[in-house]
Structure formats: structure tokens, C-alpha cells
Image: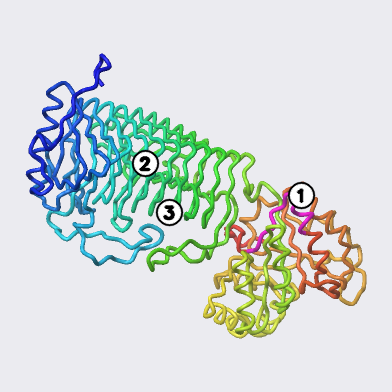
């Protein structure tokens, strides 16, 4: 439309010599003649009719709308000569390291009021630049496999397929962008972009096939788009080497989009400029390494990207490695004022924030967000992205390094250290009882730890794998159930380990039974046993609280025994979990004259004071006696702990112990 509201004229590419049967170079010349005519007329719509139109670089001009009718396909040439030169403009770019040129299929430079619309397709012909052989993908990016090295290693492959440089008032509407040989749609140092109802369908085997790349560009609205890529879905960058200082990447709104990505659903970062005032609302991200990644540096520099005022609301990130990952470089950078609100996350691992002294992280907020850990993701075309998650950490958020203010409000699960923790563990070889209790644990979403003694044979492996697949932790309890402190003194550290611990370690590894922890038989241990097992790679060991239970195994009441709920030795603050290599437990069962109401009082105390309580038994069965857990007791414990808001988790979900303190 012109200023008076009248529609500009249409310019059919056939009227300028375009033909489906002619060479791409000839179509390139014809289409560009139509564009020049439309621009010279003060603006117009260049129409691409149905059919496949093979061409080289199309250069859009001010006032021109490139309109692809339904059934129309603009398809990229596979010849270098049909594309623009790398040095066509000072701001153009290429990558020798990633092996792509500065050639583009659609290119606009310093254009204004320009658009690409219609129900047709722009096809970059990406597969033509690679052989049939693909390399195996590596986890987690390129899970479909990877086409990385183009056939022509001197020319490489074309660069970003649709590229706008230093342009204003850009509109993309309705079109499909597919089979890009590199980034799909790149906007650098532009102002005013609206993309509505666009479909990006990249070859997920081609490396660097990012979806929308918004670079040093302001005033952007992207809505109702579908993005499927072999790299980042959205790349929000500040990486123009010539104009980053005067072109902050800012005022960007993305709404109601669905994104499938082999790398990051959204990547914030890369460059030396500023990214600010960005919002994502009501979007869904699938199959990404990270749903949202903050990477202020691709290659660390003295000055990297500053990122601030990012709002993510009502979004979903599923089947990823991590929902949110903030990884700061050692150079000058900043990530601040970031909000995730009403978001649902499902991933192999929790969100993570890793700060450095120079890479400043501050004012990060998660409000009313949920995280559910998944154990595996789907396999793609014979390539296992990740079949099983070996690290069970169902906490909402991990943090390390130098990190400023981080808040979680009404998030599920609350971070460990901000709520109490119940560690339930069961010992020896009570496989039938453990198996029968699986539905009860599932009912309350609870996980426990099962410490197996004796030989790890085929029968035990089957049950242990069932328990592990439910999310429970598996630990070792010694081949011969020896008192560790006495056996170590008698045999020496190495012989004790080789005869008592190593046979279980060896069998578990060969059977692919995951384990990270060891429970001392009869809770007998010492500083020497702790040091030995830590040296051998165990993440935690389980000992015992001495003198806490009412009666010993002979039924003799222990002198000066306090009620459990008042015995501070039974509990420790959840905030100290990272300092605890050995976790001490109390044992319940009729042999100890356990009072289940007293156990419930302990659970309530742990919840109120944000403490850790570890409870151990052996078998699980109705009417169980001795040092076993009655099924009705287990349900009472699980129900009470759930009501109180305790985290009911296994030992493998505990954070890594930073020191050897107990």
C-alpha cells in the first residue's frame, strides 16, 4: 500500500524473463529486474507464480514486497557463480571455520519498507552442498547426525539464506523457509521487523541451520511461527563487528511460537554489544540442548555481551538437557534482570547458573515455574541423543561459581536447602519387598535408595534396574556385610576394598546398574573408611547416628536416650548438604521399638526447620517385624512427608559433597 492507501502494482517475474526451465543465473537476472522495476516505480509487489524457480542471489530493494503465491518455490542454485560475492558490502560476512561463504539466496542491504509474503516456499537447496554420508551426531547437539563439511571445501556452501543488513521496516508473512544451507533468516543492524505465521523447516542434519537470527536489531515482533532447525531456534545476538555500539539488540517480542531445535531453543549472546528488553510469551520449545541458553561469549574476549531485562512468560521447554543454562565467560560480561514466570520445564537435568568474577550474574528470578526430570529422550534416526540420564538431580536449580541475587518463588520443586529433605533407604537383598513397594513410592512421587549386599547376580540386576528406571537410587552395601571400620584395620585399606567393595563395583558396572553411594553395614565406619571410599569415587556414604534409637537389637533400652524429635544429632540443616559426604541415619523397625508417631513428629520437625532426616530399614512388607518396614508405616511416612512438603529423594539426587566433613 502507498501513503494514500492505494495498492502498488504487481510485477510478475515472468514479464521480466523468468522461466522455470532456464538456468539459475538467467532467473536471477530476471527476478532482480522485476525488483528494480518495482522499486523504481515507488514500490510494488513482485509476484512469484506457482512452480519451482531456480535462482541465485535475489537482492530486495526499498518499497518491494516479494510475494510467493501458493505452490511457488524459489530454489537456490548449487553454483558459486550464481551468488553474490563475499565482499559485496562492508557488513557482509562469512565463516572459514564453519565453512560457509558470504553468499545469500535473498539479500537486502539498507532497504526500507520491504517484505516477503505469501503461501509459497523459499528453499535453500541445502542438501545439494553435502554428500550423502553424515557423521554421527554427538550429544546433545546434532542428535539426528550431522552434515558439517560441504563438498566444495574451497567455496564451501552459501551463508545465511535470507539476510537483511541495515534495513528498516521489514515484514515476513506466511512464507515457508526450508532446507537452508546455513542460518535461515538473519537480521543484522535492522530496525522494525514483523514476522507473522512463518514456517522454518531446516534440514536437521545440516550444522549451523539456525532459525531466526536477530543480531543488533531493534523493534522486533515475531508471532505464530513454527521453527524446526538443526541448530538454534532463535539466536539473539549482538555480534556486528562494525556497528554493535550504536545498534543494541533490543525491544524484541516473540509470541505463540513452536520451536524444535537440535541446539538451543533460544540463545542469548555472542558478540560484544548489548541485548535488552526481550520477551518470549506462550511459546513451546522441544528437543533442545537447552531451552534457553545465555552465552555472553562464543569465543571469550576482553569485552563480551551484556544481557538484561529478559522476560519469559507462560512458556514450555520439554525434552531438553536443561531448561535454562546461564554460562558466564571469564571476560567482562553481564546477565541481569531475567524473569521466568509461569513456565513448565521437563529436562534431563535442572536449570543451571554458572557465574564468574568478571562474568556477572544478578537478579535472576523464577516465579511459579515447575521442573520435572525425565530419564531419557527419544532416539532419532538410529542416533541415541541420550537414552538414560545417569545423574539424578531433581532439584529445580543448580548454581556454582560467583552468582549474585537469584530468587525462586512458588517453584516446584523448591531448591534443596530451602526445604527439608527425607532420605529413605533400605538394605541387603529384600528384592521381593522392594519390588512390591514400587506402586506406593510412585503414588507419592517419592524416591528412595536401595543398598544391596552380596553378589550382584542376574536376578538382583533385574530388580535393581526396575527400581532405577523408577528414579530410585541404587547403592552398594558390601559383598560380605563386613563391619567396615574393623575390617579395614584388620585387612588394610586396599585389601578391604578389593575383597569387600570391588567385587560389587565390578559386577554393577558390567551390568550397567548405576550406583554412586555405599552404606556401611551395621553403620560401622570411621574417618579412614570415609577417606578410602571418597578416594575410590563414591559420591556419598551412609553411616549411623549412635545412641539415637530407643532399644538396641537385644531389646535393652539405651541409657539417657532422648526422644528422637529432640535429638539434634538425628538432623542437620539442608543448607549443609554440599558439605556432607557421609549422611548418618536412624534405623526403624520393631526390634528398635519404633513409634511411628514419633517418626511423624521427626518429619514435621525436618520440614519446619528445613533439615535433613535419614531413615533406614530393610524389607518392606505388611506386618513386617525385626528391623523391617511395615507397608502401612511406609505409607504413613510418605503421606506425612508429602503433606509437610519434604523432598523425598534418593542419595543420587544429593549435591556433590565439596568437602569430607560429616
Q: Which residues are magenta?
A: 638-651
Residue located at (12% from left, 38% from top): 14
Q: Earlier in the sequence, mark 1 or mark 3?
A: 3
Q: Is residue 409 above or below residue 204?
A: above
Numbered tag placed on residue 289 in the rendering: 3
Q: Counting other residues with Cα less than 10 Å from the Cα at mark 2, is it few (<14), some (14-19), or many (20 or more)?
A: many
Q: Earlier in the sequence, mark 3 or mark 2?
A: 2
Q: Quadrant of the C terminus?
A: bottom right
Q: Earlier in the sequence, mark 1 or mark 2?
A: 2
Tell whether 343 sits left or right of 414.
left
Q: Counting other residues with Cα less than 10 Å from the Cα at mark 1, is it few (<14), some (14-19), or many (20 or more)?
A: some
Label 3: state its secondary structure.
loop
Q: Which residue is mark 1?
A: 644
Q: Which residue is mark 2?
A: 269
Marks 1 and 3 sit apart, C-alpha to C-alpha, by 34 Å
Total residue callouts: 3
Q: Counting other residues with Cα less than 10 Å from the Cα at mark 3, is it few (<14), some (14-19), or many (20 or more)?
A: many
Marks 1 and 2 sit apart, C-alpha to C-alpha, by 41 Å
Residue located at (62% from left, 59% from top): 654
Q: Residue 105 appears in which quarter of the rendering?
A: top left
List x then y, in percent, for residue 147. Answer: 27, 60
Q: Is residue 531 above or below residue 84?
A: below
Marks 3 and 2 sit apart, C-alpha to C-alpha, by 16 Å
Amino acid at each position: 500500500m502507498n501513503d494514500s492507501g492505494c495498492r502498488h502494482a504487481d510485477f510478475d517475474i515472468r514479464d521480466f524473463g523468468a522461466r522455470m526451465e532456464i538456468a539459475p543465473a538467467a532467473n536471477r537476472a530476471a527476478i532482480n529486474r522485476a525488483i528494480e522495476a518495482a522499486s523504481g516505480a515507488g514500490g510494488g509487489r513482485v509476484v512469484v507464480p506457482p512452480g519451482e524457480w531456480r535462482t541465485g542471489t535475489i537482492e530486495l530493494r526499498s518499497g518491494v514486497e516479494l510475494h510467493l503465491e501458493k505452490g511457488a518455490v524459489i530454489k537456490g542454485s548449487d553454483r558459486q557463480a550464481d551468488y553474490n560475492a563475499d565482499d559485496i558490502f562492508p557488513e557482509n560476512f562469512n565463516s572459514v571455520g564453519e565453512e560457509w561463504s558470504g553468499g545469500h539466496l535473498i539479500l537486502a542491504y539498507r532497504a526500507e519498507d520491504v517484505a516477503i509474503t505469501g503461501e509459497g516456499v523459499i528453499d535453500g537447496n541445502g542438501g545439494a552442498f553435502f554428500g550423502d554420508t553424515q557423521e554421527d551426531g554427538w550429544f546433545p547437539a546434532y542428535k539426528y547426525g550431522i552434515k558439517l563439511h560441504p563438498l566444495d571445501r574451497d567455496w564451501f556452501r552459501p551463508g545465511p539464506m535470507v539476510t537483511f543488513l541495515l534495513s528498516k521496516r521489514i515484514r515476513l508473512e506466511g512464507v515457508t523457509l526450508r532446507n537452508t544451507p546455513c542460518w535461515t533468516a538473519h537480521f543484522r543492524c535492522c530496525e522494525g521487523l514483523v514476522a507473522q505465521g512463518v514456517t522454518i523447516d531446516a534440514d536437521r542434519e545440516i550444522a549451523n541451520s539456525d532459525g531466526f537470527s536477530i543480531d543488533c536489531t531493534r523493534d522486533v515482533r515475531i508471532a505464530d511461527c513454527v521453527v524446526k532447525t538443526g541448530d538454534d531456534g532463535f539466536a539473539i545476538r549482538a555480534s556486528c563487528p562494525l556497528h554493535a555500539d550504536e545498534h543494541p539488540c533490543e525491544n524484541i517480542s516473540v509470541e505463540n511460537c513452536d520451536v524444535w531445535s537440535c541446539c538451543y531453543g533460544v540463545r542469548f549472546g555472542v558478540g560484544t554489544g548489548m541485548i535488552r528488553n526481550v520477551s518470549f510469551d506462550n511459546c513451546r520449545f522441544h528437543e533442545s540442548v537447552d531451552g534457553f541458553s545465555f552465552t555472553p561469549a562464543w569465543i571469550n574476549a576482553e569485552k563480551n555481551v551484556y544481557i538484561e531485562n529478559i522476560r519469559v512468560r507462560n512458556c514450555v521447554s520439554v525434552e531438553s538437557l536443561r531448561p535454562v543454562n546461564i554460562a558466564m565467560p571469564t571476560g567482562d560480561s553481564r546477565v541481569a534482570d531475567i524473569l521466568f514466570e509461569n513456565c513448565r520445564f521437563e529436562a534431563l537435568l535442572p536449570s543451571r547458573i554458572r557465574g564468574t568474577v568478571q562474568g556477572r550474574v544478578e537478579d535472576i528470578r523464577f516465579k511459579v515455574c515447575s521442573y520435572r526430570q525425565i530419564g531419557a529422550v527419544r532416539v532419532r534416526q538410529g542416533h541415541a541423543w541420550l537414552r538414560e540420564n545417569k545423574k539424578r538431580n531433581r532439584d529445580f536449580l543448580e548454581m556454582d561459581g560467583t552468582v549474585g541475587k537469584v530468587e525462586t518463588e512458588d517453584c516446584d520443586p523448591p531448591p534443596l536447602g530451602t526445604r527439608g529433605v527425607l532420605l529413605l533407604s533400605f538394605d541387603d537383598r529384600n528384592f521381593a519387598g522392594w519390588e512390591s513397594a514400587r506402586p506406593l513410592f510412585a503414588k507419592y512421587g517419592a524416591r528412595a535408595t536401595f543398598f544391596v549386599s552380596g553378589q550382584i547376580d542376574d536376578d538382583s540386576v533385574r530388580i535393581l534396574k526396575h527400581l532405577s528406571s523408577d528414579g530410585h537410587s541404587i547403592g552398594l552395601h558390601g559383598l560380605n556385610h563386613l563391619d567396615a571400620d574393623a575390617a579395614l584395620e584388620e585387612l588394610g585399606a586396599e585389601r578391604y576394598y578389593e575383597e569387600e567393595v570391588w567385587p560389587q563395583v565390578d559386577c554393577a558396572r558390567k551390568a550397567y546398574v548405576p550406583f554412586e553411594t555405599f552404606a556401611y553395614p551395621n553403620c560401622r565406619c570411621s574417618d579412614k573408611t570415609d577417606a578410602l571410599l571418597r578416594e575410590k569415587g563414591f559420591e556419598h556414604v551412609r553411616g549411623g547416628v549412635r545412641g539415637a534409637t530407643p532399644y538396641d537389637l537385644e531389646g535393652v533400652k539405651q541409657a539417657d536416650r532422648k526422644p528422637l524429635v529432640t535429638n539434634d544429632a538425628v538432623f542437620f540443616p539442608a543448607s549443609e548438604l554440599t558439605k556432607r559426604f557421609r549422611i548418618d541415619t536412624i534405623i526403624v523397625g520393631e526390634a528398635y521399638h519404633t513409634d511411628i508417631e514419633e517418626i511423624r513428629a521427626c518429619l514435621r520437625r525436618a520440614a519446619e526447620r528445613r533439615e535433613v532426616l535419614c531413615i533406614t530399614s530393610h524389607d518392606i512388607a505388611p506386618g513386617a517385624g525385626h528391623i523391617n518396614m511395615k507397608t502401612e508405616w511406609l505409607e504413613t511416612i510418605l503421606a506425612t512427608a508429602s503433606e509437610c512438603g519434604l523432598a523425598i529423594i534418593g542419595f543420587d539426587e544429593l549435591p556433590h559433597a565439596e568437602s569430607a566433613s560429616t
